[in-house]
Amino acid sequence: MKIDTIRAITGPNVFSHNPVLVMRLDLENLAGKESYEVAGFIDRLLAALPGVRDHHCAKGRPGGFVERLYEGTYFGHIVEHVCLELTDRAGISVNRGKTVLAVPDRVYDVAVEYKSEPGMRRLLEIAVEYVQALADDRPYRADDGIAQAIELVHGDELGPSTKAIVDAAAERGIPWVRLSEDSLIQFGHGIHRRFLQAAMSSNTSAIAVDIASDKELTKSLLARASIPVPAGRVVESAEEAMEAFEQIGGAVAIKPLDGNQGKGVSVHVDAREQVSEAFDTAAQFSKKIIVEEMFQGRDYRLLVLNGKFVAASERIPAQVKADGLHSIRELIEIANTDPRRGEGHSKPLSAVRVDPVVISCLRKQGIDLETVPADSKTINLRENANLSTGGLATDVTDRVHESIKLIAERAARAIGLDICGVDLVVPDIAQPLSTGGIVELNAAPGLRMHEFPTSGIPRRVGAEVVRMLYPSGNGRIPIVSITGTNGKTTTTRLIAHVVAGSVSHVGMTTTEGIWIDGRQVAHGDMTGPRSAATVLSDPEVEIAILETARGGIVRNGLGYDWSDIGVMTNIHPDHIGQDGIEDENDILRIKSLVAERVREGGVLVLNADDPLLAGVPERPKVKRVAKRIVWFTFDTSNPVVQKACSAGETVYALENGVIREIAGSRRLHIVDATALPFTFGGTARFQIANLMAAVAACRALGASVSQIRARLRTFDPGRHNSGRANLYSIRDGYFLFDYGHNTRAIEAIAETAAAWRANPRTCVLGLPGDRADRMIEQAARSVARAFQRVVLREDRDLRGRKPGEVAEMIAAVIRRENPDVQIEIVSDELEATRLAINRIESGELVVALCDDCAGVRQILERCGATPASSFTRRRAERKFVA
């Protein structure tokens, strides 16, 4: 077997609502074979991994997977279950996966949920190797690979401080995403976006961080604020350090000027012979060294958020307790086996590391690493109490005297630091300050001593940081997600246009680009999750209107976790034969993800006239979350509509050309659809369907009837809906171009053209080469019935077809369906457009189903065509009557 690719899908997707890794797996020599066909394989698998006996699989009960093995299952499916089993051993247990055929006969997509992306990637690789070895009946050592996976998992984990904040945000429903390996986190959407890295936020002042990093400058500013700090000076040589020691008199602390985490710090330096050694230790971390007065007392860390005291811990230097049997070196090794200890900041406590500071501390006590101390004696390993060097912490939040709280708050405010760790040395934190004071202020202070104290009450300071960032709310902006086969772009644009009347900054994604506040910021098909992320991470955006297409959903899932409003316009045959899509039910399954991810209490807008969408509210994954269902329809006698009205649900219906909101016995006039230019006097029923969907979404957002009417009157098809049913007048005929590219879109355009009674009617047509033959043939039959002339062209991207293949196929079908149709083949789209324009007759309507809409528009404008913005039904009938 061979792994082609492994890709991560971080948002809700067609496999799971949780993040998954999708491995494209070529079975190679195991293609076409089932589990029971490889002699001895099942027995070897169950002996090697007995835990798989408990896997449920599709049977829904323990042992279900074993039954499948004996019945016969393909090897991609077996790899999935082996990988899931290995997650237990790697400490990232998950139990959900799915395997589907990607390329007939031998290539599968194996999808598994994950908690650690790098760890799970390695486990997928191991699973493939393991299953191949078992099939080949050869030995395989999985332990080494699993150890690598465990190391990758640990390296990928958020640190305790970051995790405490992220967990607190998740509890409040605040969306978050990890942006980098060093744990830069984005919280919230749009105008509520905040960044956080460790314990620094996007509100943290860069100047304040610089001040806190300069210990001497910090002391100077605190002294100006009449806050007690130790006397001292900055030195750059051992000689200067000795001078400072003698000037201060008594014990001093010697530390790097811009150090952190206790690195290079020596405290209680009280003899001349210790000064040089302490200077050399500090000089490993900074060129400038600070020598300062050593306050006598206990070592405390206070946490101040936005100028307010939150928590306090007493910090105790790293120490071991003797047992009378082991040396100090051995006692350190034993201490490091505590599961709470880990490398750096990965666990609640840091591992104790032997370094020159430890050696020096032991020497002061007259002992060394090989000493076996008396039983029960406590041996201090360092004199500084940083947790990062193996120290311990005891919560003292409830003991802090009010005067001490005030000093800490004033200190944080003095340098303007929003998240501030205040290091304080005083005899007793429960008493008013008499001696001692603040020795340091810390940007990005560790939170683990408060969240996970060695003793005392754990304090949920992560939640306090989140409360500082978000005093109220959940950091979200309204999200409207629009999907369906046809009408997505127009519906999206209509909603955004209406909303822009009351919201200053609207973010919108469509098949033609991304718009922020009415300005296009990206071009191309932007209907996938990356485009959604662009909008949701823009700090100007107040509401997101997202066109959400099949391709993005299949390949990369959704770009959001929950929407407020989901809209499904219709489900028609399209993309058959792509991405495992065999029929309309597969399309429905994919696009229903939008319905499934409408939040609790949100609104799902559905087309009641679409038989497939009528059943969406009863789909199990849609029903999991309670939401309000709103329908739109052309037919109020539709049983779905009747049932909805009886249940008190809201329906938007077209009655005598007017869209009405029906709720119980109330019928509210929303807008006259026939008066809006883009409906062409009501003849373009597909546009009215889009309009009803948009109106339903806007009303769910709280838009008033007057706002909807006013904004719709200003919706110009040419400016606001480029490439979607854009009508131009040229000489005595009309030219309409549209991006429609599937059978139902072509039928809808044809129905509109027929309502205008134009004669003749010409179609400029090309269809994507990646569509199934039967879909191309069906579209060709629709064209044959609606048009007298057809100019066939080709897309620039043939999508796997031979030159001319699709055009010849369409021509053959049209000739069989309607031999009277005049057919010409002009491969280039723009040349085909020019040909149709040059031949246009009085009373003729040319319909171009285009790929390059911008190019078609440029040709029309160069030929003197003008937008037919005032086109009405009456004008159509009068103009086109033969």
Image: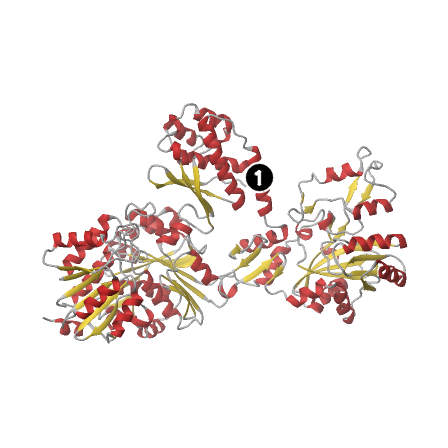
- Residue 442 locus on image (x, y percent): 70, 60
- Residue 316 locus on image (x, y percent): 77, 49
Using the image, determine if residue 709 lies above or below residue 254. below
- Residue 552 locus on image (x, y percent): 39, 54
Using the image, determine if residue 433 lies above or below residue 43. below
What amino acid type should be assigned to the residue bearing mark 1?
A: Gln
Using the image, determine if residue 854 lies above or below residue 111. below
Q: Is residue 868 visible?
A: no
Using the image, determine if residue 469 lies above or below residue 38. below
Q: Is residue 74 left or right of residue 457?
A: left
- The residue at the point 57 percent across, 63 percent down is 471
Q: Which residue is mark 1?
A: 148
Q: Residue 634: which quarter of the image?
A: bottom left
State which quarter of the image contains the N terminus.
top left
Dot 1 lies on which element? helix
In the image, 505 versus 803, the foreground residue is 803
